[in-house]
């Protein structure tokens, strides 16, 4: 049962310190440091947007010792005193939280972890507690109504733990976590653990014997499952192990005056918070401030006007598409603002009529072959079993393949696979087992390919084969939900399911598309804009070389390869065309030489040389891209030719990474947003035609990226495909031809190209 009340429990101490150390030094014009403030609220606002809580509270440590210092005089003794640049920012964090009307809890003699545990225990069972932290210490608090939302790296790499996730990753129950810590210890808190026993050894002991007491019962019996060397370490470290458990344990029965009702998220003094942020010189956070009406965030009882009027939501979105939630305002006022900023045309001619188009498509849905998916799921389960056995055999023993910790131990400790060039992650600086890093290990050991196959199959099974049938309506059709106001680029997004994420680049992924089938008496038709963003780039940049290639109807990627590699177009190899394609789309997304090398098999030097050559060929494109970046820096926003706007608050960020990301997004915005608008205009015109003339012969069902999917009567295919292509190709005029490719088939996978 999904719990309707969600309490966000913010580990303020952990997030504040993480923010300070994660970012380079930042300060306002007066020299006041602001990095920890900026980082703290970046994480706080992300958690609000992701979780959409109904209640929230922040807890902090207070100066002075705790009961743990009485147990161990050297507890946390290795920690240095925080620098003044950090401590002087904390009052400002609390002042902003007060402006947001978020209660803060502190108590002398207790750490923030203790307060989080006490509060989680005090809430009713119909409340879902979500603890937001950067540490793993709090995993012991997980239960049937408490989860942990953990920032792993930086401010965007998130890991959400419930009891099942703990078992999947560590093989432990939440109640066993403190026993594991008792043996493993924690260097950051100067908790000793058992000297000489590391992460793997501690996990193995707790998984084998269940608890710290179980481990020492086995020690007393000199259990043969414990190796002699480990046995001696356990004997010698017994006192330290039991002390470590007391230090790591969070007692949830301690007293705290806590009022759940006061944590309810409601109205707040937005202008006060904006004033504080302006004074601190961190205006980039203003656009991320929670609105007063977002569903699931902040009380909407007093502010229901916007929630009840989708037109108002769309106008607010058009005025600032990067904002996650919006304040209630009179629709007439919003319309005037649209007119003032040149956005009324997009609202009236595109977004408003599109609402009904999307509603019609959602109502129609698309037929799903659930029996086929059930067969695929069964086959996948069998294949996963075989892969599991194969991986265990290659590893020389059983382990949890889904656990990064155990996988790391197998790959790098046991199998000794070379680790040169692999990124390290987390505060422990452990080697990453993420897909992008494991990709570098392909060919070094056969287990790596098998792990990729295992991951693909398990994700395919859980995300699609087992999940999609649960979303099918009584009519046997899948009714995805579209949103016009989520993607800052103007692109449409979908949920339940997210159609954009259905895989197409692998054979296994394509099998999912085979489950999307035509209704009886119809065929499926896919009409897809060909290289639309590149065509838009050629037009906006007015690049003569790009325009010439498109006007001649050539293969743009092959033509690019010929120019970069200095060969005839007829002599371009598949590898050269593939590299050229990667370069083409990388340039549109503002990717650097480093980014291009990560996306391809090029070295960074080769990538840099190719990008340099690319801009020598397409000189006007380079001038255009530079002008867009300059405009973004000057104005703080970028517009597309129809007037759609996107703001880039991080374009002036002192953080190089944030600033570079904003520049990349600014470069791509005019192209991607215009592509989205062209598709939307085509959808509106097509729906009008279908409604008036061909409603029984043709149904528009889905849109994904630059593609539209239809059901068409077979006898009407020739007539209707021609009309649909004509509408899609003529709805907007570029300096190069707009081309739409059509395919037909019984399902979304098995489609053949239609026409010449």
Image (cartoon, grey):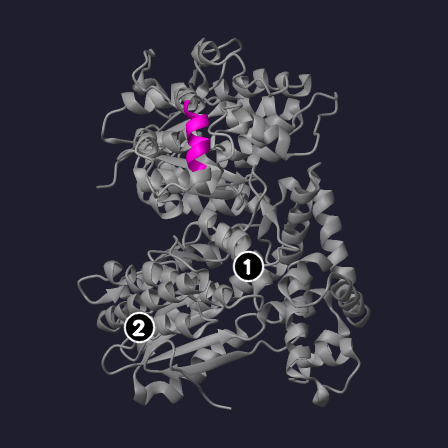
Residue of label 2 = 515
Element at label 2: loop
Nearest the camera: 38 or 135? 135
- Stretch of the chain drawn in magenta: 230-238
Q: Is residue 538 above or below residue 482?
A: below
The secondary structure that dominates the magenta segment is helix
Task: Answer left or right for 526 relative to 653.
Answer: left
Is residue 734 shown left or right of residue 117? right
Which residue sits furthest left?
474
Residue density around tag 2, few if under 14, some if 14–19, many if 20 or more, within 10 Å: many
Q: Secondary structure at mark 1?
A: helix
Q: In the figure, is residue 416 to the left or right of 494? A: right
Residue 438's tag is 1
Specify whether residue 132 is in view.
Answer: no
Position above or below: 223 against 575: above
Q: Quadrant of residue 602?
A: bottom right
Q: Is residue 143 above or below residue 422?
A: above
Q: Position of residue 182 (x, y in %)?
A: 42, 28
Residue 19 colored in magenta in the image = no
Q: Quadrant of the N terminus?
A: top left
Point 71% across, 26% down: residue: 27
Tell me how far mark 1 sits from mark 2, CA to CA. Answer: 31 Å
User: Badge 1: few (under 14), some or many (20 or more) residues near its Cα, within 10 Å?
Assistant: some
Provide residue 593's location: percent of width, then percent of height.
Answer: 73, 59
In this rendered view, identify the residue nearer to me: 144 or 325: 144
What is the x, y in percent for residue 411? 52, 56
- Which comes before the other along the chain, label 1 or label 2? 1
């Amino acid at each position: 049962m999904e719990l309707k009340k969600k309490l966000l429990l913010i580990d303020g101490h952990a997030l504040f310190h993480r923010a300070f150390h994660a970012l380079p030094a930042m300060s306002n014009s007066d020299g006041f440091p602001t990095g920890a403030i900026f980082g703290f609220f970046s994480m706080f606002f992300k958690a609000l947007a992701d979780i959409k809580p109904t209640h929230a509270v922040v807890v902090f440590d207070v100066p002075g010792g705790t009961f743990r210092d009485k147990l161990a005089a050297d507890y946390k003794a290795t920690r240095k005193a925080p620098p003044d640049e950090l401590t002087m920012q904390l009052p400002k964090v609390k002042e902003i939280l007060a402006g947001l009307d978020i209660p803060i809890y502190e108590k002398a003699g207790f750490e923030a972890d203790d307060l989080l545990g006490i509060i989680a225990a005090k809430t009713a069972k119909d409340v879902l507690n979500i603890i937001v932290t950067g540490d793993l210490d709090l995993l012991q608090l997980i239960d049937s109504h408490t989860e942990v939302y953990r920032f792993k790296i930086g401010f965007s790499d998130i890991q959400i733990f419930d009891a099942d996730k703990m078992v999947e990753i560590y093989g432990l129950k939440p109640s066993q976590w403190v026993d594991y810590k008792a043996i493993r210890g924690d260097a950051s808190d100067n908790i000793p653990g058992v000297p000489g026993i590391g992460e793997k050894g501690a996990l193995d002991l707790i998984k084998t014997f269940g608890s710290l007491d179980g481990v020492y019962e086995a020690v007393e019996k000199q259990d043969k499952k414990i190796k002699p060397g480990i046995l001696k370490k356990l004997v010698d470290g017994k006192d330290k192990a039991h002390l470590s458990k007391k230090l790591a344990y969070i007692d949830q029965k301690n007293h705290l005056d806590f009022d759940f009702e006061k944590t309810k998220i409601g109205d707040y003094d937005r202008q006060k918070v904006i004033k504080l942020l302006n004074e601190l010189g961190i205006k980039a956070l203003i656009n991320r401030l929670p609105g007063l009406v977002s569903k699931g965030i902040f009380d909407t009882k007093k502010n229901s006007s916007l929630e009840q009027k989708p037109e108002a939501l769309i106008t607010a979105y058009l005025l600032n598409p990067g904002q996650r939630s919006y304040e209630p305002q009179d629709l007439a006022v919003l319309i005037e603002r649209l007119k003032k900023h040149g956005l009324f045309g997009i609202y009236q001619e595109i977004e408003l009529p599109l609402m009904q188009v999307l509603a019609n498509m959602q109502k129609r849905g698309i037929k799903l072959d659930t029996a086929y998916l059930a067969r695929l799921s069964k086959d996948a389960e069998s294949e996963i079993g075989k892969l599991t056995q194969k991986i265990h055999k290659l590893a020389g023993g059983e382990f949890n393949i889904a656990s990064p910790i155990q996988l790391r131990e197998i790959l790098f400790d046991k199998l000794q696979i070379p680790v040169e060039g692999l990124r390290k992650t987390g505060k422990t600086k452990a080697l990453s087992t993420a897909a992008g890093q494991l990709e570098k290990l392909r060919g070094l050991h056969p287990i790596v390919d098998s792990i990729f196959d295992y991951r693909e199959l398990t994700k395919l099974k859980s995300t699609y084969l087992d999940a999609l049938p649960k979303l099918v309506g009584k009519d046997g059709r899948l009714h995805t939900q579209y949103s016009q106001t989520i993607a800052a680029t103007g692109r449409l997004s979908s949920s339940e399911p997210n159609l954009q994420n259905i895989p197409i680049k692998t054979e296994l992924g394509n099998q999912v598309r085979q489950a999307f089938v035509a209704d009886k008496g119809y065929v499926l038709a896919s009409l897809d804009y060909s290289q639309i963003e590149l065509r838009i780039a050629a037009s906006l940049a007015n690049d003569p070389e790009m325009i010439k290639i498109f006007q001649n109807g050539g293969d743009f990627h092959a033509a690019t390869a010929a120019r970069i590699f200095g060969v005839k177009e007829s002599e371009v190899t598949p590898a050269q065309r593939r590299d050229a394609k990667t370069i083409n789309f990388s340039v549109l997304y503002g990717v650097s030489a480093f980014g291009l090398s990560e996306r391809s098999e090029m070295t960074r030097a080769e990538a840099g040389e190719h990008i340099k050559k690319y801009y020598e060929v397409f000189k006007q494109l380079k001038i255009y891209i530079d002008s867009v970046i300059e405009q973004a820096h000057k104005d703080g926003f970028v517009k597309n030719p129809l007037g759609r706007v996107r703001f880039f608050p991080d374009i002036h960020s002192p953080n190089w990474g944030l600033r570079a990301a904003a520049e990349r997004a600014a470069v791509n915005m005019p192209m991607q947003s215009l592509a989205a608008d062209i598709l939307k205009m085509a959808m509106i015109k097509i729906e009008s035609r279908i409604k008036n003339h061909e409603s029984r012969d043709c149904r528009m069902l889905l849109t994904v990226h630059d593609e539209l999917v239809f059901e068409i009567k077979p006898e009407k295919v020739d007539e209707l495909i021609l009309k649909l292509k004509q509408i899609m190709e003529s709805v907007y005029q570029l300096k190069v031809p707009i081309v739409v490719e059509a395919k037909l088939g019984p399902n979304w996978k098995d489609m053949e190209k239609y026409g010449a």
